[in-house]
Amino acid sequence: MTQIQMTRRVVFSAALIVPHETNPDSARFGYSGHNYTLDVGVMGKVDPRTGIVVNIKEIDQIVRRAVLEKLDGKLINGETGPIGRCRGTSELVLEKIHEMLEDQLPDSVSLTALRLESTQLDVNEWLSETGAVASRANSRSGETLVTRVYEFAASHRLNSPHLSDHENVELFGKCNHCNGHGHNYVLEVTVSGKIDENTGVVISIEQLDAIVNAEIIDRYDHRHLNMDIPEFFDVIPSSEIVTRTIWDRIEPQLRQNARLYRVILRETARNFFEYYGKD
Ligand code: NI
């Protein structure tokens, strides 16, 4: 079964009452405030009719309603705060966000990952046990992960032949515009494997670059995916499908000891798509 994890990034700021630093049990307390970055990862199957897992606007609205409206710009713990009386640690803020979102998502997806960045040096994450991230990480324990980042610019149009013109506009909005639109995509390719005793690497960067450039970058960069790239002539080049296609093209090219672990495709600064191969 093909499941893709889609992550939506939102930012908010909040203040917390925190226990006194040197004596947490004293009656004294202070305040802390952060500009938080929250990544919400949901996973589901690609709907063959639409080429997407879930409408990103819907997820964005849910996160805004369930989390941001309650926390953004507020003092969030204590007697009157939305997360109630608690010590105000990042761990507890993340746990409360999890509770706020848990029952709010549409049935077609499950909540699989949350990442809360309080500062660049202070990050908390939660991964569901059933999510691809956790299960794939277990299956590769003891191996080393190597990630290489690539960029390409390409245009595409989201339009499903299974939907009416009206339904296409309704679902895809601006992304349905008849002449397409472009993205500066950032592609992260991660391979896993044992470090080769002779070379000291899992895979040579030259070898990985040669594969990714030949299969993806040289072919997609500065092209219109729907019109120029044969693998998208008959499917909708949504980021979900592009992510999976990139996996399907790179994976067979890798040698046995360095296996493809993950493909991440960043479409904008606020959303990215992740694929770990078939379950
Ligand atoms: Ni687009």
Image: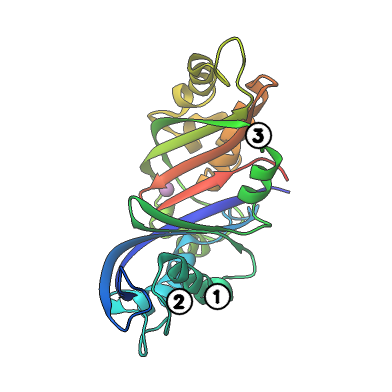
Identify residue for label 2. Answer: 66
Asked if the residue under mark 1 is in contact with the one under mark 2, i.e. CB atoms within 8 Å, the reply is yes
Identified by mark 2, the residue type is Ala
How far apart marks 2 and 1 lie (CA) works out to: 7 Å
* Image spot of residue 52 (x, y percent): 56, 54
Residue drawn 41% across the image and 76% down it: 87
Instruction: Look at the numbered disc 1 and give the secondary structure of its residue.
Output: loop
**Residue 233 seen in the figure:** no
Identified by mark 1, the residue type is Gln
Asked if the residue under mark 3 is in contact with the one under mark 2, i.e. CB atoms within 8 Å, the reply is no
Q: Which label belongs to residue 142? A: 3
Horizontal arrangement in the rendering, residue 104 relative to residue 257 (left or right): left
Identify residue for label 1. Answer: 104
How far apart marks 1 and 3 lie (CA) works out to: 36 Å
Instruction: Look at the numbered disc 3 and give the secondary structure of its residue.
Output: loop
Horizontal arrangement in the rendering, residue 222 relative to residue 146 (left or right): left
Toward the viewer: 35 or 211?
A: 35
Disc 1 or disc 3, which is closer to the eye?
Answer: 3
Identified by mark 3, the residue type is Gly
How far apart marks 2 and 3 lie (CA) works out to: 38 Å
Q: Quadrant of residue 65?
A: bottom left
Q: Quadrant of residue 162?
A: bottom right
**Residue 222 seen in the figure:** yes
